[in-house]
Amino acid sequence: SSSLIYQRIDGPFTFKIGGTYRIVFNLGTLRNGTTVFGRIFRNNEPYGTERSVTNNGSDFSENLFFESNDTFDLRIRTTDQTVNAQSNSFSVFISFASIIS
């Protein structure tokens, strides 16, 4: 994605069960020195921490709470419209112990 505004990578996805989820994603650029940003969005609003890198790849993870039927997606952007931001992986994890009582 080459944009000064956030572009959705995939989704949105919907959580069917509320709880705390671990979101893990990779963020990078093919042109070292160009800053690229990534952020999780919940229900079409920025959520979690904005992450940034200036190299070809770093992994980030966040534990974020979602209600049942919340939507989420990963969005990325770059400060240079001639350079692509990229995400090579995007994973979601939940502990079943947290949803079974």
Image (tube, rainbow, N blue to C red):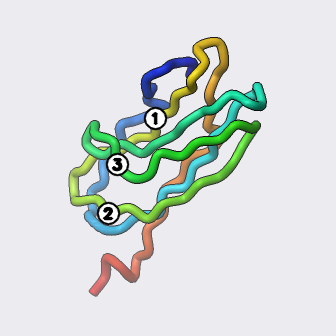
Residue highlighted by disc 3:
47
Residue depth check, mark 2 versus mark 3: number of the one nearer the observer: 3
Which quadrant: the C terminus? bottom left
Amino acid at circle 3: Tyr
Residue 23 in percent (x, y) is at: 48, 56
Which residue corresponds to the image point at 76% horizontal and 25% vertical from the top-left?
Answer: 31
Element assignment for label 1: strand
Q: Which residue is under mark 2?
A: 65
Q: Are marks 3 and 1 in contact (CB under 8 Å)?
A: no
Residue 37 picture location, percent across and down: 54, 36
Mark 1, other Cα within 10 Å: few <14 / some 14–19 / many ≥20:
many
User: Which quarter of the image is occupied by the N terminus?
Assistant: top right
**Residue lying at 51% horizontally and 32% vertically, measured from the top left:** 76
Name the N-terminal-most of marks 3 and 1: 3
Q: Are marks 1 and 2 in contact (CB under 8 Å)?
A: no
- In the displayed orientation, state which residue is furthest to the bottom: 101
Judge whether 68 appears above or below 45 on screen. below
Crowding at dot 3, Cα within 10 Å, few <14 / some 14-19 / many 20+, comes out as: some
Residue with the most extreme top position: 82
For the residues marked 1 and 2, what is the alpha-carbon distance in whole angstroms? 18 Å
